[in-house]
Image (spheres, rainbow, N blue to C red):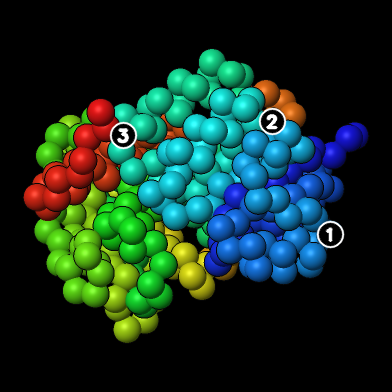
Amino acid sequence: MVKLRAGVIGVGHLGQHHARLYASLPDSALVGVIDEDQGRASVIAQKHGAQVFSDLPDFLKQVEVVSIAVPTSGHYSVTKACLEAGKHVLVEKPIAVLPVEARELVELAKRNRCTLQVGHSERFNPILQLMRSHIQKPVLFECYRLGTYSGRGIDVDVVLDLMIHDLDLVLSFDPGPVEDVRAAGVTVLSSTSDVSNARVQFKSGCVVNLTASRISPKATRQWHVFQGDGCVSIDFQSRQGVIGRRSLESGGKPMVVAEEVQAGDGEPLKLQLESFLHAIRLKSRPIVSGEDGVAALELAHRVLSAMGVSLPHKT
C-alpha cells in the first residue's frame, strides 16, 4: 500500500505531535511542514526527515493530507486554502471561529470530495471509548475542564478553547435539540473570558452543567453522568472510571454498586490520526466530521451569546 503524503501546518505545541505521528504511522509519510517560525519548522522537519516549506502553494503541491494546528483565528483561512487545493484536512478544534465559516468549509469539502475531520481528540480518549457504552439515556452531565494558564489558545474565549471539547462529547451522545442555554464568564488574564460556567438544557430533558477554566491551580478533566439506572464518573487525565449501578440489598433496600475501571494508555492523537487516514482510504465519514465540528461550534456560540459575548459576523 502506497503511503499517503502528509504535511503539517503549524508545528508548535500540538502540531509537532502531528508531525511525529505522520512520520511513524505505517499508512502515512511526513513530506513537509510549514510554520511562521522557520527555525521551529526546521527543527521539527530535520527530526523527522521532512522538508521545510515557506510558501503554502508549494507545500500543497507536495502533499495529499494536511493537519492544521495554527492558532484558532487562522483555522478558517488555512483550511479553506487546503480544501480549495483538493487536500484532505484534519483541522484542530474548533473548526473555525464563526459558524458561518465552519459551514462554508463543510460545503467546500463536499464540493471538492475532500475528507474533513475536526480534531476533537477527546473522542479518542481510551477511557471515553471504554465508558461510552455505559452511558445510556443520561439525564444530567456535570463536566469540569480546568487547566493552568499557559498563554496558548488565548486568541479565543475559554469556551472555544476548552469547553468546546465537552460540548462536542455531549452532542456525540445525541441528546437532541437544545431548549435553553444560560452562562457566565470571567476575564482574568487574557482579553477574553478565562473562566466560564454554562447550563445547557435539551428538549429531551437532559441537562448539562459545564465549567471550563484556563487559570486554575491544577488541571482537572472530569465528568459525572447521572441516569435512571445509576451513574458514571470519568477522569480523562488518569483514564479511570467508576460505573455505579442500581441494585438491591438482600433485604430489598435500594443501593448503588460501584465498579472501578482503568483504560489503557493509547495516545488519543495517534488514534485520531489513524481514524482520519482510514476514513480517507475508505472515503467514509470521519468519526468527528466537519458537520460535528459545526454542531459543537454552534452550541459554543449559544453559550457565548448567553454570556453576553458578541463575536463579529462574517461579511
Q: Please, what secondary structure does the residue beneath circle 1 have? A: loop
Quadrant of residue 224 in the image? bottom left
Q: Nearer the viewer, mark 3 or mark 2?
A: 3
Identified at 15% across, 61% down, the residue is: 185
Q: Please, what secondary structure does the residue beneath circle 2 have? A: helix
Mark 3 or mark 2: whose residue is earlier in sequence: 3
Q: Which residue is tagged 1?
A: 49
Q: Position of residue 202 (x, y in %)?
A: 20, 37
Q: Is residue 304 above or below residue 315?
A: below
Q: Which residue is tagged 2?
A: 280
Identified at 73% across, 43% down, the residue is: 6
Q: Which residue is tagged 3?
A: 99
Mark 3–mark 2 CB contact (< 8 Å): no
Tell me, yes or no, if residue 49 can be seen here.
yes
Instruction: Tell me the kind of residue under disc 2.
Output: Ile
Q: Position of residue 62 (x, y in %)?
A: 76, 38
Q: Please, what secondary structure does the residue beneath circle 3 have? A: helix
Q: Nearer the viewer, mark 1 or mark 2?
A: 1
